[in-house]
Amino acid sequence: MIDLIIFLSLIALGYGAGTWAEKRHYRSILKREQAMLNLPAVSLKSVDIPDHKIRSAQMVYGSAVISVDYFKRLLAGLRNVFGGRVKSYESLVDRARREALLRMKAMAGDATVIVNVRIETATIGRQSARKNIACLEAMAYGTALTVEE
């Protein structure tokens, strides 16, 4: 009986630590998104800026590899059996994409706008017959334009 209590306590501790780390990452993302709100990143191929006003253009990118903790992966496996939304994987994709966009914006420096933004995702890790996702990579890239005033 004591072994079961210890086992369940460790599972709860692991789940709680993973949830705390995920919430901390979300707070960090929100803070950095607010700081970079003045740099638009758009999927348009071009914007209405005359060529003679563009001072510089450079490719910028950001990449993030995010993993869900073991306990949330276990719960997601149970959700796959019964069906429905897998919130832990939705959170995984959301965090990876937002982090990649933030890193791309950080690379842009003092650019005015980032155009032609694209986001690619890929799973990383072992791919067994059950197709469990070990972690997810998101890569955002685009063209940073610096425009003369």
Image (cartoon, helix red, strand yellow):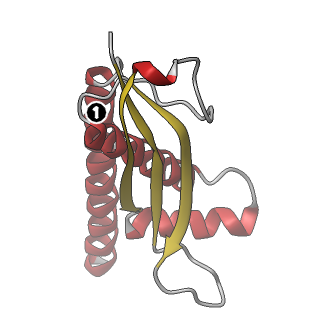
Q: Residue at x 26, y 77 (%)?
A: 2
Q: Which residue is mark 1?
A: 27
Residue lying farthest top? 149
Q: Nearer the viewer, residue 18 or 98?
A: 98
Which amino acid, mark 1?
Answer: Arg
**View extreme (front): residue:** 52
Say if 95 sits above or below 139 in the image.
above
Residue at x-position 28% and y-position 33%: 27
Q: 137 or 52: nearer the eye?
A: 52
- Quadrant in which residue 146 is drawn: top left
Pick the quarter of the image with the C terminus.
Answer: top left
Classify the position of the N terminus by image quarter. bottom left
Q: Quadrant of residue 14?
A: bottom left
Task: State left or right for residue 80 relative to residue 28.
Answer: right
Rate crowding at label 1 as few (under 14), some (14 to 19) or many (20 or more) other CA atoms within 10 Å. Answer: few
Among the 4 quarters of the image, the one containing residue 36:
top left
**Residue 65 % position (x, y):** 37, 63
Expressed as whole percent of the image width and height from the top left, the position of residue 72 reads 46, 61
Viewer-proximal residue, 141 or 7?
A: 141
Q: Residue furthest right?
A: 83
Q: Nearer the viewer, residue 122 or 148?
A: 148
All told, the count of numbered labels is 1
SS at mark 1?
helix
Q: Is residue 21 above or below residue 31?
A: below
Residue at x 25% of width, y 55% of height: 17
Please provide percent x and percent y for residue 25: 29, 43
- Identified at 37% across, 45% down, the residue is 99
Give the image location of residue 19, x and y in percent: 34, 49
